[in-house]
Each structure stands twice: as structure tokens, then as C-alpha cells.
Image: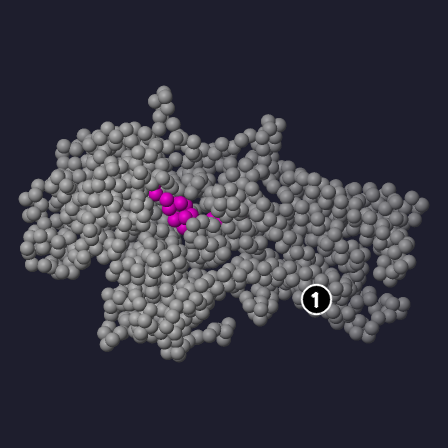
Amino acid sequence: MAFWRRNTHIEKERHVKANARDYNDKFSYADNRIKTSKYNIFTFLPINLFEQFQRVANAYFLVLLILQVIPEISSLSWFTTIVPLVLVLVITAVKDATDDYFRHKSDQQVNNRQSQVLIRGSLQNEKWMNVRVGDIIRLENNQFVAADILLLCSSEPYGLCYIETAELDGETNLKVRQALTVTSDLKDITKLMDFDGEVICEPPNNKLDKFTGTLYWRDNKYPLDNEKMLLRGCVLRNTEWCFGMVIFAGLQTKLMQNCGRTTFKRTSIDKLMNTLVLWIFAFLICMGVILAIGNTIWVSWIGRNFQVFLPGEEFQSNAVFSGFLTFWSYIIILNTVVPISLYVSVEVLRLGHSYFINWDQKMFCRQTNTAAEARTTTLNEELGQVEFIFSDKTGTLTQNIMVFSKCSINGQTYGDVYNEFDEKVEITEKTACVDFSFNPLCDKAFKFYDGSLIEAIKLEDLAVQEFFRLLALCHTVMPEEKSEGHLVYLAQSPDEGALVTAARNFGFVFRARTPETITLCEMGRAVTYQLLAILDFNNVRKRMSVIVRNPQGQIKLYCKGADTIIFDRLDPSSEALMYTTSEHLNEFAGEGLRTLALAYKDLDEDDFEVWMKKLLFASTVIENREDQLAVLYEEIEQGLKLLGATAIEDKLQEGVPETIACLNLADIKIWVLTGDKLETAMNIGYSCNMLRDDMNEVFVISGHTLLEQLQLKILNSVTHRVSSVGDVEKTDMFADDSVFEEAIIAEYALVINGHSLAHALEPQLEHILLDLACLCKTVICCRVTPLQKAQVVELVKRHKRAVTLAIGDGANDVSMIKTAHIGVGISGQEGMQAVLASDYSFAQFRYLQRLLLVHGRWSYFRMCNFLCYFFYKNFAFTLVHFWYGFFCGFSAQTVYDQWFITLFNIVYTSLPVLAMGLFDQDVNDQNSLRYPSLYKPGQQNLLFNKRQFFLCTLQGMGTSFLLFFIPYGAFSVMVKEDGSHFSDQQTFAVTIATTLVIVVSVQIGLDKHYWTAVNHLFIWGSLTVYFAILFAMQSNGIFGIFPSNFPFVGTARNCLSEKSVWLVILLTTVVCVVPGLVVSFLRVDLFPTLTDKVRHLQQSRKKEGPQEQNLRRVRRTSSRRSAYAFSHQQGYGELITSGKNMKMSTVSSAGSPGRTPHSSTWIENMLKRKNEVPIKNMII
């Protein structure tokens, strides 16, 4: 469909001129309209029909329809095929059109958002879809960015602005973008209208973290990078306004480039059905050939003798041609082995299963008033076969809310609550919170439950005061005080925000900062500290320090960081305290909390002066500057005195560890694909019990690893794993010993970052990566782009015959949701993009457990039983014609009345099989969740496969054989009560038809696992309806009205009034049903499956009444400690000391010093104070 594309040439570089639509239109760039729908009013019919006829069955029925309009070969009306075929096509088309309508509606909602565009000298409101490349647009605080724009200027000093990129990478911490210096002063509309700069940059691509371009303006060139760009999907935060120039729009934005195409998803059962239909068609041709050959022989040897009293057409006297016509006649008659009603029934079942998901009150979230929703009806049974789950982290597993939970100060822990018997009690919503009313500047949303910490503060415990003083000073948070006492902290790391907020509530309030000072409000007193240096955080140091001078003139270094790093730098006098704090840290880490150690050091004035001179010199060198600075940082951060440790809870979604543990027991592999940093992802892995201390090994592949090194590392890991796999296999012997005892077997985990993953996804390495990952119990991919998420999913889909499920809540998850076999969207904090692209949606991750283990398993179980029974009954129904062909001269005469053939699948047997497919269940929902191993048959495709199909068709063939030959043999020797013979074909037909209806009804009763009133009504009702219609259609009255359409007048009345006929029906029913019943009984008794055992247990417990299911709370037992501020970024210390991110005007607080009028680093300030030569543009 390439001819539908507007622009087919490959763009090598992009030229964009500001305020010049005519110039930019020459390049035919995409407009800002987005399209996630599949069809439009013109393409719907051809594309939808093409997709529907990809089902072999639909094409098969179309061929049959063509054959049926040829009178010479058809003994059935074409009407019997075209009506159900059109019905199936229309129902499916309406469903697809409805789904696509909602996509169109979503697209319109986005495209019609308003944006302020600079047009003809004024700002005008324009719809997003009318924004064009080269336009200058104005964004305001909390607005979504409409397109990929180059930041020109903002309300903040130095052209800074803050953005949240949750839609792109899942991170909710703020990021800083800064305009070019030459454009940061374009704050006036007139100046912006005169701006005629031209940007030459890279063509549209999907790299979120990279942009290369150049701005040409006023005969100068200015380099552009990603730090100057605001991408579509970002939200402007804590910035009143900004102006930007549109570089990429619509489908060419980086967000949309990362969104995969909407694909036509089909279940594995659908694909299997295509294969089976081909097999059945081949089998049909074989039967047709056999019967055609029989007809040719019969016409040659016997048929000619009938010409005298049964003359036919001239062409029928040719035996070969007669056989040819007979072949096509039998193809039409025997086509009911795959009736089109099968596909109607499948769609009805899927629709019903979807409604069960929508109506499930146990998947309804009352907090957000959100119900689970099946947004597609075609994938329900696939939910029962999932082997791989690909999950986002932020907003999916976690709430991305950091809470100050506990701390250890001077060897004393705070945060636990004890009762009057000095026993620790669990904190619940009813637990009383600490009263912070003594502090007018407290954050009312902050909750803490241990009152002893407040008492220590009020008693002026020096260690406790120093502890919170450190938290209030050692950070890179920016305060915003819009009104007196109303503080808002702008933290680029949620960890830091939680720690500074804790210090604020305990009386050490961070009020204001300048490049040279930090102002606190300590227990109501304003105190200003002189900021001498910030020793910034990075991933190698894993710590951050500040050096300040207090009002008493003392110089202090405050340091916080990973406990292992801090402990190595402690003064020997802190050794005893270190051991005590280490024990507390182990307790905190065991509860899944993110731990952090705090220490300080008193600095001598002379020693500090010497160190500062060394630092100033190291800051001026060109080569190895960072290494030399690191050495100096290391030098001064020695001999620290330990204060204690903090424990922050990265709050998980409710029930996440329990859900993951349960899914692991179901043999479902869970891979976490996140944009967060490696250590953040690992910490959440431990919190969720995906990573555990009892795992044999956790392989970590990180850094900018060279391809050869990465290959060697993976190969070594595989070798290591294979050498130890014997230990794991030993446990398999005991896997089925106990039905009711299931445990997670300790295995291996793989953690890999985005850069290494990019190498590992190359063709020569991807097989090795996949083999290693599939041997691991847990896989965590961090720092991955949305496209990489999709590539990982595609890798598993392509090389593993396994069903994949992707779950996420943000726009950065859309690509993998579309790529996976099943996409699940969580309606969370990051918008509705993931939900709109998904197949299923709900409010919390924990509902995934019920979606898969209950609804998914039931849907798969019901669909498989439905298909097995449907093929059985239709082979039993149809193949009677085959056996009859040998006794009717291969004339393609039907055994049954034509009305019976029409109504058998539509009326007589449709409702019982639908009831089984909708309501049957082998075990109830409580046991489905209690025994997750019940899910495994679906993963192994055991309930319906080619072998099961062969067995059920074999049973159907055997039943058809018995249905024909038992009455045939009985009628050949049997007489009526008046002594006459049963010689007419019509009586024979009614007997077989009645026996068939009774046999299939008894069989479905035996196949059911769960009886409801609906099942009873449909089975007994269908039998009643059969006899009612039978007697009605063969009555004198209907014959009198339609003599040519109802020729079997009086047959039912005469036939079924004979006792011997009922004896034949009973004998045939028993002989058909008993063998299958015996086999089923022996299988359950001698070779019971896990399902059989659980069913037996469930039935034995029915008399005991309902039992409440108490799920054990899964708790983390890891002793692993988390490192400091994982989402923290390097470079914020320099940004703060430069003053670039300071507000021009803030509400002054008591004792807050004025802001310095110019920008300078703290090194420059020190130089000025020492009358040294000024050094500018230092980078630390």
C-alpha cells in the first residue's frame, strides 16, 4: 500500500526555517495530525474483507457458495451457505469498525487540542493538527508539548525550563532543558516574529536521547543537541511559559516514531484452525474422490441397467463425467464437517468471555472507580497460554511515590510502632500518625508513625538534629515559595524530595538557596549556611557531599550515599556505631526499603584552604580533569563520622509481590523493561521478589560494553548456567509429588542496560542473548527506549513458540503493547495512551493475576472443550452420508431430511454447546488462584492441538459408523408390530437423526464439568425443541400447505410409535457413549492430572461450606542494600552553584539573603575572595 503514502522519498537531512510556512511546505513535511486507527471510510471494506478472508475457513465457504449455485452438482440450496457466511462477515466487520471508531475518536481528541501559535504577529489558538513544521508555539505550565520543538526562550532565567518525561521513559522526576544563549532573550512577540533562523538537522528517527543539528542565524552557526529539545509527550512543569520552534510534527515526532504499527492479532487457536481446515478440506477431497470413484464404477457396472425405467440426462450416461459431478456433489454435502456456525459460535463465545471480564467485580478498582475492560474480543483464550510477560516498572509495578519510612540515628532505630506489651505492630491505615502541628511549615501530606523521633527532636538530641540538618543541606533540590509558608520542592530525584520533606517535617526546613548560601528554618529559627562546595553525585562515586560554613564559622562536610561506600571512609571512632547501623540496614533492606548512609566531618580551616587550592588547580587542567577531581573528592571524604541511615520506601502497587510470586508458580516468565537506571530497576526487582538472595547468580551486563566483550560475557554466562542446570533438573522429579505444595525454585536472573542491549540485539548476538535470557527466571532490561522494548518482545515472538503479553501504563509502553500477542494497559498516572493501544485494561497490576489464571485459563479451557466437542458432533453428523453412499449407488443422496441438515447446527445442538463454552469450569476461581500450576496445560497447548483434534474426529467417525450400521443392521432383521418390514428410507432417516441428537446431548452432558440452570435448560430444551419441530414438520397440516418442501409426512408419528425403534435408539446411544465413558473413568482413576486432583479436593470440601482464602503476604528476605538516589543525575551541583536555575524573583523568607546579581561557580567565588585570577567557564 505504498501508493497511499504522501511522501515516499527518503529524507537525509531536514531544513526548517522559522516563521516561513511557504519555505517549509516545499519539503512536504508531515503535518501534526496523528493516526492510530487502521481504516478510513474508503479502505475499511477492502482491508477488512482481506483480513477476514485470511481465515482459510471463510475462503473455503466462499468456494462452497460458488459450487452451490451450480444446479447440476448441488443438492442443497445456496441460501443455506450465503446467509451464515454474510452473517459472520458482518458481525466481525461491525466489531472491527467499532474498535476502530474509538481509535478515531481518540485521535480526534488529541488532534483537536488547542495550542498557541505565532501567526502574522500575534498568538492565535490553533488545533494541534494544524500546527506545522517551522511554527513558533507558546507552551504554558502543565501543558503537553504538541510536537518536537527547539526551545527558544522561557520565563525562567537563562532560558531554562523543567519537563516531565513520563510519557517517554516512565520517569516522573523533573529534567532540565536550556535554550541557546542567543535565543534566550527572544521573550517579546516582536522579536520572535523577526526570528528567521534556519535549523539543519537529522531526519526523523526514534532515538529519544539523541538529536544533532545546527541553527544558522545572523551569519552564525550554533550547535544543537538533545538538551535544547522538548519532545512531544513531555509535560512542561514549574515553568510559567516557554516558546519553541517546531522541528518534527505528527507521525514524524520521536514519540510516534517509537509507536509500533497497529497489527492484526490472531490467536494460536485461530492459526491452528486454519491448518485444521486445510486438513479437513484434504480429508473431504479424499472422501469425495472415493465416493466419485465408487459412482463411476457403479454407473459402469450397475447404473446402466436403471436407464430403462429411470432415464437420466445424456451426460449422466458417461460414467467418468457422472463421477466428476458426484465428486462436487459430495463436497457440498459433506461440507458440514466444518460448518460456518462454528465460526459464529466462536465469536459469540469470545464476546461472552469479554463481558465476563468487564463484569468481574474482583477486578474493579474502587479508589479510581475503574472496571476491567476487554477492548478486543478475539484474544480471550490466548490469555490462558501466556508464557512471557513484559512489564514496565514505573506506574505499573510501582506507584513512583517515595516515602520516608524509617531511619537509624546514633544506633537507635525509628519508624516502628510498638504496643503496650512492647511488641511491634503492623502499621495500617488506622494507625495514628505523629502530630506535626508544632511545625507551621510542615508538609501535611507527610506521615510518620513513631512518636519517639519527635520526642528526640524536642529534647534537642544533638545527633538527631545533626542528622536532619544533613538532610536539609546535602541535596540539589530547588525550593519554590509562591506564598509565605507554602513551600514546593522541585527535586530531580524522588529520593531527594522524600528526604528533604522528612527534614522539613522534623523541624529543619529548607527555605531558600542561592549559588553561595543555603537558608534553613531550624526549629523556627532562620539559619543561613555559606555554601563552599558541592561534591556532586555520579554513578561511580554513589555519594554526594556539601561543604558549608555555619553561622559559628565552623566548616563542615556533610555526605550521604550508598552504605558500602560511606562505611569504607569512616573514622575508626565510628566502628562500633557502624556495626550497629549495619544491622539496622540489613533489617531495612530485608523489608525492601531503599537505604542510605549519612556521615559528616569537621574540617580544619587551614586544611580546607590547602585542599581548595588543589581543587582549583585540578579544575583548570584539560586532560584527565574528572579523574583528578575524583581523587581530590576522595581525599577530603575520609575520616567521616557516622550519623545513621535512612530507609525510603519506593511504594509498590498493591499486591505486586504476591502477584509476581503467583505468576512465577504458573511457570510464567516475567521480564521488566524500564527506562529507569540499572540500580533502580534492580532494587524494585528485589522488592518484588523477582530477584532474591537464594538465586544461584544474578548476571549484570552494563556499561558501554564492546561487542566482543559482550559476546564473551554472555557465552561465559551460558556456559556457567548449563554447567549448573543439572541441579535444577533434579527438582523436576519432585515437581508433581504434591498437588498442594508449590515453591519457587531458585534459579538465575539477567540484568542488562539499554546500551548493551542494543549490541545484544544485533543479528549475530540475538540468539545467544535469547538463549541466556530464557534460561533465567527473571530478566530486567533497564535504560531501554520504547522501540527497544518492542524489539525485545519481537525477538521472543520470532524465535520462541510462546504467547507474549506486554503490560504498561504510559505512551512509552505503546510500542511493546502493540507488538506483543496480548497488550494490557493500566489506567494510571501517565495518561491513557497505553490503554487506548491495549487489548485489555484495568487499574492495577495485581488484577493481571486474575485476568490470566482465572479468566484466561477458563477461556482457554472452554474454547478447547467447545472445539473438541464441535468437531466430534459434526463428524458424527456428517460422515453418516459417507457410509450411506455405499448403499445408495453413490448418488449423493442425503440420509437426513434437508430441514434436519439445516437446523442441526443452528437449532438442535447450538445452545447446549454454547452453554458449555460460556459457563463450564473445571475448578472454581479460588482454586484457580490457589493452584497456579493449573495454568500450565495452556502454555503447553495440551487441551486442543493436532493430536486432540485427531482423537475427537476419530471418536466422531466411530460414532457415525455406529449411528449408521446399528440401525441398518437392526432394520434388516426387524419387523413392525403388524409384521411388516421397516423398508422405507424416511423411517431410517428419522431413526438415525433422533439417535444422533440424543447421543450428542448425552455426550455433552458427560463432558460438562460444571452444571448450571442454563445448561439444564439448553440441553433438555434442545431435545424438546427437536421433537416438537420433527412432529410439526412431518404433520399433515404443514404438508398440506407446503407439499413440495415437507415430503416426510407422517414419518415421525409412524416411526417413533414403534417400541423396536426406541430399542434401536437406546442400543445405539449406549454403544456410542459407553466406550468414551469407560476411557474417561480409567484415565481419571489411573492417570489423574493436577486438575483432576484439585477437582476431587474441591468436591470433597463442598460439604464443609465456603472457606476464606488467606493468601500469604510475600515479603522480601534479601539483605541486598540499595545505593543512593538511583534516578539522580550528575551535573546538578554545577547547575546550582552557577545560579542558572535560580528564580529571578521569589517570595523572600525570614533571614533569606539576596540573590547574587551575576552567574558564577563556587570556585570563582572562592577565587574572588582570595584575590586570585578569575577563572571562567569551569566544569566540575
Q: Which quadrant of the view contains residue 507?
A: top left
Residue 128 in the figure: left or right of residue 995: left
Give residue 988's position: percent from left, percent from top: 83, 52
The outermost residue toward the top is 421
Choose between 739 and 203: the one closer to the eye.
Answer: 203
> What residue did someone put label 1 on?
65
Residue 625 in the figure: left or right of residue 936: left
Q: Residues within 10 Å of mark 1 (few under 14, many from 20)?
A: some
Choose between 1035 and 1143: the one closer to the eye.
Answer: 1143
Q: Which residues are magenta?
A: 384-403
What colouring style does the render use? one colour
Q: Is residue 587 above or below residue 509?
A: above
Based on the picture, tell me whether residue 841 belongs to the magenta stretch: no
Choose between 589 and 730: the one closer to the eye.
Answer: 589
Q: Is residue 672 visible?
A: no
Q: Is residue 131 above or below residue 1074?
A: below
Q: Which quadrant of the view contains residue 812?
A: bottom left
Choose between 563 and 505: the one closer to the eye.
Answer: 505
